[in-house]
Amino acid sequence: MIRAGIVVTGTEVITGRISDSNGPWVSERLAELGVEVAHIIVVADRPDDLEAALRFLADEGMDLIVTTGGLGPTADDLTAEVVARFAGRELVLDEEMLAKIAEILSNFARRLKLDEAALLDSNRKQAMVPEGATALDPVGTAPGLVVPAGERIVIVLPGPPRELQPMWRVALSTEPVQEVLARATPLHGYTLRMFGVPESEIAKSLREIEADDGVDLGAVEITTCLRRGEIEIDIRFRDEAAAVAERVRDGLAGRHRKETFSLDGETVDDQVAALLRGHRLGLAESYSGGLLAARITNLPGSSAYMAGSIVAYSNEAKAELLGVDAALIESKGAVSPEVAEAMAIGAIDRFGADVAVSITGIAGPDGGSEEKPVGYVCFNARLADGTAIARDPVIPGSRFDIRERSALVGMHLLRTLLSGSDAPM
Amino acid sequence: MIRAGIVVTGTEVITGRISDSNGPWVSERLAELGVEVAHIIVVADRPDDLEAALRFLADEGMDLIVTTGGLGPTADDLTAEVVARFAGRELVLDEEMLAKIAEILSNFARRLKLDEAALLDSNRKQAMVPEGATALDPVGTAPGLVVPAGERIVIVLPGPPRELQPMWRVALSTEPVQEVLARATPLHGYTLRMFGVPESEIAKSLREIEADDGVDLGAVEITTCLRRGEIEIDIRFRDEAAAVAERVRDGLAGRHRKETFSLDGETVDDQVAALLRGHRLGLAESYSGGLLAARITNLPGSSAYMAGSIVAYSNEAKAELLGVDAALIESKGAVSPEVAEAMAIGAIDRFGADVAVSITGIAGPDGGSEEKPVGYVCFNARLADGTAIARDPVIPGSRFDIRERSALVGMHLLRTLLSGSDAPM
C-alpha cells in the first residue's frame, strides 16, 4: 500500500482566514491513483513546525509527501529552504529557472509599471533549487519541485489553486513520481446517497450485511457521513474486492430502498434539474425566504424550466401575491398544511406553472408554540393536475439548519413528485 | 507561549467530500485566548493514524490537543477509544451519560418511528468514557470529553459544527482546561471590514502607516484577506501594543473612509438589519434567484421589515408579477438599468414597501454578449419617495461567484441608501 502525507503551509490557513482547498484536492487526486492519504497537516509559516511535520510524515513511512504554499518571494515563504534541509540537499541557483522567472516578471513589470530590478531581486530566491531535485516550470512566478528525500519523494507545489492544479499534472509526469505511482493499485468507489434515514440505521444495516449476508466488510473501505441532511455512503475498493463492494452497495440500497436516491454519487440537484426539463416550475416560499429558489437557480440552464418564486414573507404578500384567502390564514394560521396548499396552488396560477412547491414554517428563534413549535414546516409539492405531496415535519436544529433543511426537503419532494417514486419521508 | 494542536478526524474530510470548518474555527477561538496553534492535522478514520497524530503533537510539546469528529455510533467512530489508549486510561461505561443518551434517543425514535432498542444498542458506545476524564453533555447524541494525558489536556469534540461550537464553551469552563488557559496571555483584536477596495491598496496604506506615520507594525499581527468580496483586516495585539493597534486601525479607516463600513467586526448583514427596522422591504430578483431574499431573511427578526421578494426569473414573470412593461424588456433587454429600475418600482408597488432593491443580470455560463458580457448585473435600490442608487457593474468570476457577489452588492446598496453614506462603488 502506497501512502502519502500532505503539508499545507500558511498562517492565513491555520488562523482560518483562508479555507484551504488544496489539501482535499491533492488528496482526492492521490486517492484516484490508489495512494492512501494518511495525514493532511496544516502548519503556519514557521520553519520549525514545517520541518517537524515533514519528519513526522517520514517517520510514519510515507512514500510520498506533497507540500503546498510558501513558495512566494517574501521573507515568510520558506518551503523550498526547509524541504532542502529536510532532504539534506544544498540549495543552488538554477540559472535556467532564473531566466524563465525574469522573462515572466519583465512582462509583468511592464504591464504594471513596476521596478523590474527590485522585482527580480525579490524573486531571485524562487530560482533556488535543491541539488538533484527536478524543478517544475512556474505557472505563476513560483517554480514547483520534485525532491528525492531518502526513501521518499517530496512534491513541492505553490499555494494558489490555479497554479497548483496545472503543476500537479506536470509533477505526476516526472520520473521519480512515476516510479512511486507504479507501485500503487487504483481504487474504485461507489457513492450512495440517502435521505430520511438516520446514521444509526446504516450502522445496523452494515452489521446485518456482515452477519446475515456473510459479507466481509473488512475487504472494502466504507465511510458513512451525514452531509447537509443527507446520508452519503462511500464504498472504496480495489479490483479484487469488486464483488464484495457490489454486495455492500446492493445490501444497503435493498434495505433502504425508499431512502436511497443515488447509487452513483449523483446529487438530488442533478436529478431535479433533469426531471424538471420540459416542465415550468413556480415556487411559493415563506420563511425559507428564497433558499429553494436560490438552490434551483444555482444550476446552469435552470432558466429553461424555472419561472420564478414568490417569497411571500408577510401575510399580506401571501394573500395579495399568491391569492391565499386571508380568512384561511386567519383560521388555520400562516403555517398550516392548508395555507401551504393554497400557496402552491397560487404559484401554479401566478406563474402559469405545471409544477410548484410551497414552503411555510417557523424558523425561530421566536414564533413557536406548544402546537406549532420552532421547526414546524409545511410543504406542498404539486402538479397542475392536482397530484400533490404534502408534508409537515418538525425540523430540528438552529434557524440556519431549519431553513437549509427546508430547501433540501423541497428538492426531495420535487424529485419524488416528478419521478413518481415513493416519498422517503 | 501556550501551544496547541488540532486533530480533525474523518475519512470524508481527508477525501475532500466534506470541507472541514472545525479546525479553523477552533484555531480562531484558541488564538483569541492567546494560544498559538502549531498544527491542524486531518486524519482518516484509521486508529493508528489518529494515535500517531496525537503522539506527534505530544512529542512537539503541545499543551493542549483538540480533536474533532469520530464520536458517532458507527464502527468507524473511534476517537474516544484511541484518545483513551493515548492517555493510558481505561474506557468505562458512564451510566449517567447512558441515561442521558437514552432519553435523547427515545424522543428521537418516537418522532421518526425507529426501533429504539437498535438505536440505543448502536449508541451505547457513545457512553464509554476514559477513566478520570470529564464527560461533556451531548448537544446531539455524542458526549464530548476532556481527558488529561500526562502534561497535556486533550479536548474531544463531536464533528457537527452545531454540536461542536456550543460544547466548546462547556469544555473551556472545565477545570483542567482553565488551568492551561490561565498560563496564556489573551490576544485582543480589531476587525475592520471594507467593501470596494483592492487588497493591494491596503498593502500600500500599511506601508504608508509605517513610513509616514512611523507606526511599528511589527508590534501587532495584521492579516488582510479577501473574504466573500469584502476585505477583512484583522489586527491582533497584546495589552502592551494597544496604542499601536489603534493607530493602525485609525490609519487604515482614515485612508479608506468610503470603503470602511465596520471597525468592530460588525457585518453588513447586522448593519442592514438594524437600518431596516421600521421600514418595509420588498425585493425584485431575477438571475440572483432569491439569494438576496435568503440572505436578508437569514437574520432573526427579519419578518419585522421583510415583506417579501418576487423572483421573476422569466420575462413573463417580470411583466405579470412586477408590472415591468414588456415593451421595455423588448427594447432595452431584461438585463438593463431601465428594467432594473422598473423592477424596483414594481417591488415597492406590489409589496406596499417603502424600500426596494432589484437585481437583474447575466450569471452565465451562457447568455453573454459583446455589449453585455457574462457577469453584467444591473442593480436598483430605491425608497418610495424616488431616492435611488443605480449600479451596473460587470462582476468577474464563476456563475456561483457572480450570484453570491450580487447579493453582497445588494446588501451594500441597501446599507448605503438607508444610512445616507457615500456609495463605495
Image (spheres, coloured by chain):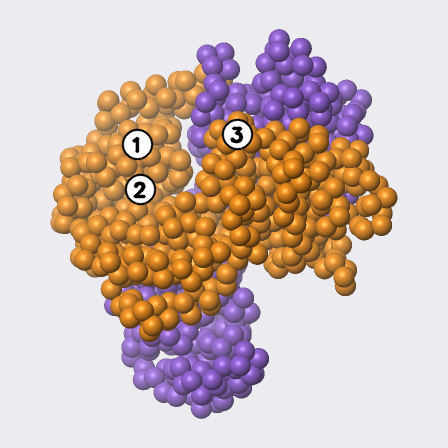
Chain colours: A purple, B orange
* Label 2: which secondary element: helix
| Gap in angstroms between the C-alphas marked 1 and 3 | 44 Å
Q: Is residue A12 above or below residue A111?
A: above
Task: Work out whether mark 1 precedes mark 3 in sequence or the reverse, and give the earlier one.
Answer: 1
For the residues labelled 2 and 1, the Cα–Cα distance comes to 12 Å
Image location of residue A310, percent across then percent down:
68, 31
Secondary structure category for the residue under label 1: loop
Q: Is residue A54 left or right of residue A144?
A: left
Is residue A185 something one can see in this rendering? no
Mark with earlier residue (2, 1): 2
The answer to whether one can see residue B31 in this image is yes
Relative horizontal placement of residue A257, taking residue A306 as reference (left or right): left
Q: Chain of mark 1?
A: B
State the mark number for residue B143. 1
Q: Which residue is mark 2?
A: B79
- Please, is residue A95 above or below residue A285 in the view? below
Nearer to me, B416 or B46:
B416
Residue at the spot x=40%, y=39% of the render? B161
User: In the image, what residue type sits under mark 3?
Assistant: Gly
- Residue plotted at (42% across, 55% down): B232
Q: Name the amino acid type tagged 2.
A: Thr
At 34% from the left and 58% from the top, the residue drawn is: B249
Q: In whole angstroms, how far apart are the C-alphas of marks 2 and 3?
A: 50 Å
Q: Quadrant of residue A61?
A: bottom left
Where residue B412 sits in the image (x, y, percent)? Answer: 54, 47
Q: Position of residue B388 (x, y in %)?
A: 64, 45
Task: Say whether marks 2 and 1 touch (CB < 8 Å).
Answer: no
Query: At 40% across and 77% down in the image, what residue appears?
Result: A73
Callout 2: residue from which chain? B
Q: Nearer the viewer, mark 1 or mark 3?
A: 3
Residue at image mark 3: B278
The chain carrying label 3 is B
